[in-house]
Image: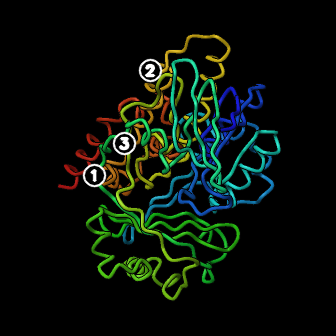
Amino acid sequence: MSKEFVDVLVIGAGPSGCVSSSYLKNNNINVKVVEKTKFPRLVVGESLIPRVMDHFDEAGLLPALQTIGFEKKLGARFLRGNEICIFDFSNKFGEGWDWTWQVPRSDFDHTLAQEVINKGVDLEFETEVIDIKFDGTNSITTVKSKDGETKEIHARFVIDSSGYGRVLPRLLDLEKPSKLSPHSAIFSHVKDSNREEGTEGTLISFDIIETEVWLWVIPFSNGNTSLGIVGPTEYIDNLLENKNTAHALKKAISLSDYYIKRFRDIEFHFEPKHLKDYSCSVKSLFGNGFALTGNASEFLDPVFSSGMAFATESGMLAAKLALRQLNGEKIDWQKEYADYILYGVDVFTTYIKEWYTGNLQELFFHQPENEDIKRKICAVLAGYVWNKDNPFVRKHDTVIKNLANLIKLEKQ
């Protein structure tokens, strides 16, 4: 069996893996990326939040992305019947980017991967990790190519950015049930032929059908739009009574008073995908010689588009710490990596839980709007969930519940 020797092996060429490998390459580290699929490939997670822009910028990947002309995302709109709440990222608490993108992920990820290759990173597509062993100082990863050939990759450090593939969690028995209640989704893309001119046509929206059920509408610059329904798994299973995902998604669209006219007779570009019980977790974010990033570690819920923010945040941080470790520094991975990442996970977990209890929706739609509260929540939705100057980050576990209770008392 042939052998390769590298400093860092990155598993997965999605946004997290590209940020990690690009940063390491920029710092003269011998890095290799293996990716199980062939790009471009279909993947969910098309709505970004501003925090990711910091990471693409720092990794040197932003110029390549800016040439494509993705739809600019300046904020987000939430609908509930006749009620409307719009968050503007330029009007948020604290510093940070005030825009990002809405992207067809096949194009977005393909652009990232090609730019990483352009930088000189050795990236192998259609190469699957089938085994890994750690001996305390090095790892030996066995991979299989599309031709069925196997080889060993010896690395001083491994970053698992394998997303839903969750390579190391599966191989090292690190899987753990999510703390969130089971939710599922069905989504597809459509040619948005009834799209209105101006902001209305391009605005990302979350239309609340019931407290725990919502429709996403994500318009792209290529004239297509992503449509998806999210709800408790039992609710989605009921929509799928005849196992027909297209019928289920059309039924979901018909429940939206706001979007029924725009999407009533629409044809799906592909058979809608069913993502069942998507939330996942792990026992540990790191081990001796490896770190887990992005969806290979934690995936929460799509409602606030936090997935890629955690992917790039963890991808960048893992690369920085790995670089320092390779340079002989002793790294406290628990304190510097796991504790840090999990703080942001905890903040978003609170917001997701309080969304589905209805408490956060009380704050979103309360009239008259409290501009100060809205700015602080907006910073969280923009992904700045590590800024403890923001009381809606620092006191996340109590502030939403307490304010929602005050609103309910006021109504009574």
Secondary structure under tag 3 reads: helix
Mark 1 vs 3, N-terminal side: 1
The correct choice, above or below, for 306 with respect to 168 in the image is: below
**The disc label shown at residue 190, or none:** none
Towards the viewer: 130 or 15: 130
What is the distance, in whole Å, between disc 2 and disc 3 at their CAs?
20 Å
Q: How crowded is mark 3: few (under 14 residues within 10 Å), some or many (20 or more)?
A: many
Q: From the viewer's perspective, is the residue at label 2 or at label 3 nearer?
A: 2
**The disc label shown at residue 334, or none:** 2
Mark 1 vs 2, N-terminal side: 1
Mark 2 vs 3, N-terminal side: 2
Amino acid under disc 2: Gln
**The disc label shown at residue 349, or none:** 3
The picture quadrant where one finds residue 158 is top right
Amino acid under disc 1: Ser
Residue 217, horizontal then vertical, whole percent: 52, 68
| Side of 61 where 34 appears, left or right | left
Residue located beneath label 1 in the image: 181
Residue 123, horizontal then vertical, whole percent: 72, 44
Towards the viewer: 58 or 71: 58
